């Protein structure tokens, strides 16, 4: 097991299986089909994301560098949370971007389905964690990967 | 560190204007604190711009939130424009597609009514290019905006010299409701400096949409300082340069997350501050012909039959300017003449802002375009494409943004012209 310490953006505790993308995560492109067709597993529909395309994201510890793309991104994450299709948590290797922060905070303030969010976990975190690994997030931003 | 709020902002946060207002302020405060903002600053632009224009039935949580805002009296303090509408009967669609659209966008009427209550400028204010002269939402240099829509934000920052973060949908409305936004990122002088130098060393004017895509994929959300592009665009921000930068910026914002770029000798801050905008230790990305070819070759084609004959072409994502509409009409007319055809070889849709279309309709080119068989629409092509029926169609586009979010296949302007004129079908 290895632990990483990041900065808490939205506090919370959760344990989930990792879903990892090394490339920027395009939130709209990734969630749009799942939202549109009510896919409760939220399979990633971003054709440009070789790491996650076709893989479920709901209930996973989404490990990513940052999000990219449309400014609907935060709203899409908020909708995913309200519809119960959200990742269990969002774990960023880099400082969080404005769209992802908006989504995590909107869910935290306006939805019952909050997504604990930690950023600045470092490149080493993203190098180490692999899809399928068990990831635990503590309230103080400590992330354990086993 | 907690953000320092004004007494009025503090009172709102503590519920003086009700629970809904308090939650709006709490969201903005948390949003700012995530980026180390120490204060809120007033929104100084005359108008806002919202990204959410579609009454998509599955986006119920957004409409429920809008209802909460309206019921809580949390209305925008400024009028705003909004991204394009998703439906237009001028755009070709078959019987099944039309039924699907009606189901999919069943909330459109209700959502438009919500936007009226929240403060939309007028019923023709739906476009991603709200900053066109005809559309009239043109921020001044240095103004602070609370906008979303990635292509509009990057344009306002880079070409107009306004200041706006890449806000998400909903957050941009919250800023307009509060009349203030957290001060961080692209609002600050430091946040507008470039950790990347992009050197354009191509043998011809690069395709705007591929250049933007290459830059976005490389720098992600960072600010690039672009050298060598003034060789192809000149040093004046004339209509042609603005249109080029509109398309380049949209690609950089959708293929990456660029919210601001500087073009040496051309964009406002690059003209006044020059290389002073480049951060010490900036990385360099050289873009030559081979690099553009490499980037384009990497675009996946997810059509079932990659060699299928296109059934539809979309031109205008982001929406075309009036000058682009005229240019495309002339180019297409000439190409059809050359191909010995009187009308387009496949269904073609040009998209532009309602107010741009209204002015274009006053020119002789409008009738000429109609005779060529091209549909002219105000819709968002992305909204049209995002359903299983349209998603399976082999659609071509010259928009890298549309390519990114849908199954549409990207072609350069010259390639798509050859297809729609029948030269290459």
Image (cartoon, grey):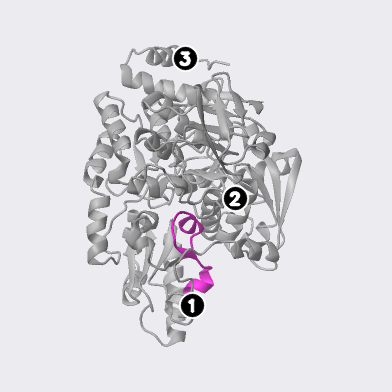
Q: Quadrant of residue B68?
A: top left
B248 versus B275 height, above or below: below
B19 versus B395 height, above or below: above
Q: CA distance from mark 2 to mark 3?
A: 37 Å
Q: Residue at x 66, y 57 (%)?
A: B230
Q: Which mark is residue A108?
A: none
Residue B3 in picture, x, y percent from top left = 53, 17
Q: CA distance from mark 1 to mark 2?
A: 27 Å
Depth check, front residue: B38 or A40: A40
B46 versus B382 height, above or below: above
Chain ID of residue with mark 3: B
Q: Which mark is residue B418?
A: 1
Q: Which mark is residue B6?
A: 3
Image quarter where the C terminus of chain B lies is bottom left
Q: Tell me which segment is drawn in magenta.
A: B397-418
Q: Earlier in the sequence, mark 1 or mark 2?
A: 2
Q: Is B20 one of the magenta-colored residues?
A: no
Q: In the image as oriented, which residue stretches furthest toward the right?
A: B281
Q: Quadrant of residue B36?
A: top right
Q: Residue at x 65, y 28 (%)?
A: A1
Residue B120 in picture, x, y percent from top left = 30, 39
Chain ID of residue with mark 2: B
Depth check, front residue: A97 or B263: A97
- The answer to whether residue B358 is left or right of residue B246 is left
Q: Which residue is mark 2?
A: B216
Query: CB under 8 Å between callouts 2 and 3?
Result: no
Q: CA distance from mark 3 to mark 1?
A: 59 Å
Depth check, front residue: B140 or B96: B96
């Amino acid at each position: 097991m290895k632990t990483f310490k990041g900065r808490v953006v939205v506090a919370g505790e959760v344990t989930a299986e990792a879903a990892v993308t090394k490339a920027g995560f395009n939130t709209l492109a990734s969630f749009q089909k799942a939202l549109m067709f009510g896919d409760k597993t939220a399979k990633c529909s971003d054709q440009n994301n070789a790491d996650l395309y076709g893989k479920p994201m709901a209930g996973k510890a989404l490990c990513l560098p940052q999000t990219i793309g449309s400014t609907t991104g935060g709203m899409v994450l908020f909708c995913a949370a309200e519809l119960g299709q959200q990742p269990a948590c969002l774990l960023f290797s880099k400082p969080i971007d404005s769209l992802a922060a908006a989504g995590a905070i909107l869910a935290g303030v306006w939805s019952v389905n909050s997504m604990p969010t930690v950023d600045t976990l470092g490149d080493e975190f993203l190098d180490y964690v692999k899809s399928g690994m068990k990831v635990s997030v503590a309230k103080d931003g400590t992330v354990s990967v086993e | 560190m907690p953000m320092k709020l004004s007494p009025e902002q503090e009172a709102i946060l503590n519920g003086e204007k009700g629970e809904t207002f308090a939650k709006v302020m709490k969201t903005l405060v948390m949003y700012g604190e995530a980026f180390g903002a120490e204060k809120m600053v007033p929104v100084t632009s005359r108008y806002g711009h919202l990204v959410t224009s579609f009454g998509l039935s599955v986006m119920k949580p957004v409409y429920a939130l809008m209802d909460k805002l309206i019921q809580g009296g949390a209305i925008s303090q400024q009028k705003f424009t909004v991204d394009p509408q998703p439906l237009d009967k001028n755009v070709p669609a078959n019987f099944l597609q039309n039924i699907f659209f009606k189901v999919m966008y069943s909330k459109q009427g209700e959502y438009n009514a919500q936007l009226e209550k929240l403060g939309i400028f007028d019923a023709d204010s739906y476009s991603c290019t709200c900053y066109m002269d005809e559309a009239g939402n043109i921020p001044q240099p240095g103004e602070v905006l609370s906008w979303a829509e990635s292509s509009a934000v990057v344009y306002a920052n880079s070409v107009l010299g306004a200041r706006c973060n890449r806000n998400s949908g909903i957050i941009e409305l919250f800023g307009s409701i509060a009349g203030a936004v957290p001060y961080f990122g692209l609002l600050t002088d430091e946040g507008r400096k470039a950790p990347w130098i992009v050197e354009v060393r191509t043998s011809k004017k690069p395709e705007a949409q591929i250049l933007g895509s290459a830059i976005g994929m490389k720098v992600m959300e960072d600010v690039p300082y672009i050298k060598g592009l003034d060789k192809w665009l000149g040093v004046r921000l004339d209509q042609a340069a603005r249109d080029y930068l509109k398309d380049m910026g949209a690609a950089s914002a959708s293929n990456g997350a660029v919210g601001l770029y500087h073009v040496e000798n051309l964009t406002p801050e690059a003209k006044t501050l020059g290389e002073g905008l480049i951060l010490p230790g900036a990385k360099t990305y050289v873009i030559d012909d081979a690099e553009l070819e490499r980037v384009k070759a990497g675009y996946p084609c997810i059509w079932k039959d990659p060699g299928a004959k296109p059934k539809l072409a979309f031109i205008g994502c982001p929406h075309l300017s009036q000058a682009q509409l005229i240019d495309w009409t002339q180019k297409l007319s000439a190409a059809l003449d050359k191909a010995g055809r009187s009308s387009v070889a496949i269904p073609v849709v040009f998209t532009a802002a309602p107010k741009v279309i209204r002015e274009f309709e006053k020119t002789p080119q409008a009738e000429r375009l109609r005779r060529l068989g091209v549909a002219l629409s105000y819709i968002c092509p992305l909204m049209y494409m995002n359903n299983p029926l349209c998603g399976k169609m082999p659609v071509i586009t010259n928009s890298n943004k549309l390519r990114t979010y849908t199954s549409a296949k990207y072609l350069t302007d010259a390639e798509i012209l050859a297809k729609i004129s029948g030269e290459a079908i």
